[in-house]
Amino acid sequence: MSLKKILHVEDDESIRLIVEMALVDLFGMTLVSCDGGAQALAQLNHFVPELILMDAMMPKMDGLQVLAEIRQRPDTLNIPVVFMTARIQQAEKQQYLDAGAIAVIEKPFEATELGSQLSVIYQQYQS
């Protein structure tokens, strides 16, 4: 099954725009972008993504807090989450994986490869 629907959670507008161009324009995916955790949790009430791409460091609610909320809801419990962060120490990466993320992508990322990268991660998660 190919990856088509993504929820993107990122407080930096320029990164949201780059991800939108990469995933929608280059890969034809359906993307809903949110500027923070509260907006993402609200979107999940009516948009069911196949994957959530989330910034780790955000004001108000960081990525781990948002992930904890997502995992408490029966309807979003099994949606795979991929973190995107500039802070990529091994211990931090392990913390995201231990919290339930399926992968961590380092910033800066290669926009032209993001769709393929996420599709591979999603396929591996599915199998």
Image (tube, rainbow, N blue to C red):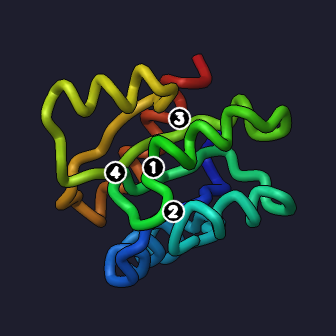
Q: Which mark is residue 9?
A: 2
SS of the residue under disc 1: helix
Return the residue nearer the eye: 84 or 24: 84
SS of the residue under disc 4: strand
Image quarter in which the C terminus is found: top right
Q: Residue at x 51, y 74 (%)?
A: 35
Q: Which mark is residue 84?
A: 4
- 107 to 125, vertically: above or below: below
Inter-mark Cα distance, 1 to 4:
9 Å
Return the residue nearer the eye: 53 or 2: 53
Q: Which mark is residue 89?
A: none
Give the residue type that dot 2 points to. Answer: Val
Does the CB distance between marks 3 and 1 fall below 8 Å? no
**Residue 10 drawn at (x, y percent):** 44, 67
Q: Which residue is mark 3?
A: 122
Inter-mark Cα distance, 2 to 1:
8 Å
What crowding class fits label 2: few (fewer than 14 Cα within 10 Å), some (14-19), or many (20 or more)?
Answer: many
**Residue 46 drawn at (x, y percent):** 86, 62
- Left or right of 8 on screen, residue 105: left
Inter-mark Cα distance, 4 to 2:
9 Å
Give the residue type that dot 4 points to. Answer: Met
Q: Nearer the viewer, mark 4 or mark 3?
A: 4
Going from the N terminus, do you reach mark 2 or mark 3 first?
2
Going from the N terminus, do you reach mark 1 or mark 4 first?
1
Going from the N terminus, do you reach mark 4 or mark 3 first?
4
